[in-house]
Image: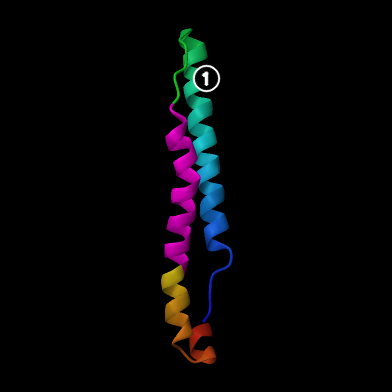
Amino acid sequence: MSRCTSCSPLGLTGGVIGAAVGIATVVAVSAAKQWTPLLDLRPAVAAPVAGAAVGLLAGLYPALRAAGMEPVEALR
């Protein structure tokens, strides 16, 4: 069966970058307003996991579809 070997790492990377940008934004706004930033790290940890899962699911459908085709037809 064909598989997308870069789909999960790509989703994981997107989740890590998204969590990092979110945390940096909260800290920057808190610093600008002279607030104390309060962060729940569970969503920051869950974001990369969710990104990897979404990447896996997004790559699984085309891979399964291509696996059922003749190789020449899959390239068209």
Residue 7, horizontal then vertical, whole percent: 53, 62
**Where is 15 relative to 60, above or below?**
above
**Where is 10 relative to 72, above or below?**
above
| Residue at x 52% of width, y 47% of height | 14
| Residue at x 56% of width, y 49% of height | 13
| Residue at x 44% of width, y 78% of height | 64
Q: Quadrant of residue 54?
A: bottom left
| Residue at x 54% of width, y 42% of height | 16
Q: Find disc 1 in the rendering and name its residue.
A: 28
Residue 63, horizontal then vertical, whole percent: 47, 75
Residue type for callout 1: Ala
Q: Residue furthest front?
A: 42
Q: Residue furthest top?
A: 34
Report the span colored magenta. 40-59
In depth, the one of 32 and 39 nearer the eye is 39
Q: Check disc 1 and report its element: helix, strand or loop.
A: helix
**Where is 48 relative to 4, above or below?**
above
Colour scheme: rainbow
| Residue 76 seen in render | no
